[in-house]
Image (tube, rainbow, N blue to C red):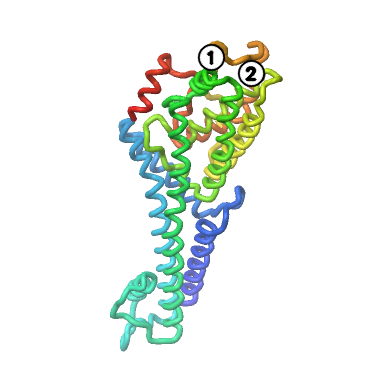
Amino acid sequence: MHVLAALAGATVIALTLAEFFFAFILPRRVKHEPRIARLILVAGWRVWRSVARRLPARSGDTMLGFYGPLLLLFAIGLWAFALIFGFALLQWAGGSHVVRGAAGGFDDDLFFSAGGFLSASMQLSPSTGLARGLFLGEAACGFGVLFVAIGYLPAIYQAYSRREVTVAQLAPRAGTPPSAGALLVRSGRRGGWPDLDLYLAEWEEWAAELMETHLSYPALAYFRSQHVGQNWLAALTTVLDACAFSLAAAPQQAEIEAAEITFSIGRHALADVSHVLRAKAGHGEPSRLSSADFAALWELAARSGFDLRAKEEVEPRLSELRARYEPRVAGLSLALELTPPSWLPPSDTEAGRSQAYSR
């Protein structure tokens, strides 16, 4: 029995430290993410989401916003408990030499292990070389885990802050909720394709950083925006919509290089985040842009000052480009309970902008 306990304790410690290393320290690869962390992330979200769906809309959205921060605390606590439990098994397998002059039980070993992990003072003390070695090893693991976790939390909140600053900056141009139509109206009045392409170039770096940070910190995907009507998925989708429209509708002489590059990196970000979160691409969902809506969008862009290709030429090309990213958007929106943006702005664009600023 003691041999089995020693093997179980060593296995728990080794797996926990390996998982902690892969989740918190090693830069994560798209197809080699930590399995236990992924299981906690996805399975916990399903339970949390099912409870939130039973609440009123505003209360449910508030509850969903708690998941990301609470997940981080839960994961750190779970890894700490696993290490404490693993070292307690080793102490028990070694004879429970933590009570001087008496034989200790597993409860004493568990209490002693918790004190060793947290470097807390206690009346129990190791009385053999093996017990002392385990105590020092656990104290070192405790310091390492807690120090890495302390450095991890500021990093993830800095990544969240950088993401949300750019999302908030989209509101004056694209409204709240954002739409590609509102972005086209604003850019058309400011200079047409050159202005739009210049703005889309700013999103190339944001999309690349989003991909990198959400691969390294998958919990970031569950951190919701501070303003109602805004979220990172809607912002990225709006930018991809604008890129797709540029590639489909801009005449040959127009300079739209930034739109092409941002479209590529944005699609890459959607694919990688979908893979990490195990969000299946959506198929069969209602189209975000019907033929009637496309006609309205084309007319809106033309009235705003854009030089456009023929409507009959643009629509099939735009449909082809949309098919490259909209299934990923649909999958992530369902997985994360985030509402995808519409293509067309509200009927009263100025009112929409006023609403965005009032929030």
- In the orientation shown, which residue stands out farthest toward the front? 191
* Amino acid at the residue labelled 1: Ser
Badge 2 marks a residue whose secondary structure is helix
Task: Give the mark toward the camera: 2 or 1.
Answer: 1
* Amino acid at the residue labelled 2: Ala
Can you give x and y, in whole percent of width and height, for residue 314 in the image?
65, 16
Instruction: Name the one closer to the observer, 119 or 50.
Output: 119
Quadrant position of residue 118 = bottom left
Would residue 244 be seen by someone viewing this image from the given angle?
Answer: yes
The residue at which mark 2 appears reads as 249
Q: Give the answer, above or below, for where 16 lies relative to 350.
A: below
Q: Give the answer, above or below, for where 252 lies relative to 95.
A: above
Can you give x and y, in whole percent of width and height, for residue 103 in the image?
33, 83
* Residue at 57% in and 55% down: 27
Left or right: 269 in relation to 253: left
The residue at which mark 1 appears reads as 304
Within 10 Å of disc 1 (Cα), the crowding (few <14, some 14-19, many 20+) is some
Badge 1 marks a residue whose secondary structure is loop
Can you give x and y, in whole percent of width and height, for residue 155 in the image?
46, 53
Label drawn at residue 323:
none
Looking at marks 2 and 1 on the same chain, the residue that comes earlier in the sequence is marked by: 2
* Residue at 35% in and 39% down: 51
Can you give x and y, in whole percent of width and height, for residue 95 in the image?
41, 82
Q: Give the answer, above or below, for where 293 lies relative to 159.
A: above
Left or right: 138 in relation to 275: left
Would residue 1 be seen by someone viewing this image from the given angle?
Answer: no
Q: Are marks 2 and 1 in contact (CB under 8 Å)?
A: no
Instruction: Name the one closer to the observer, 175 or 305.
Output: 305
* Residue at 57% in and 25% down: 195
Q: Give the answer, above or below, for where 78 lies relative to 280.
A: below
* Residue at 55% in and 15% down: 301
Q: Quadrant of the C terminus?
A: top left
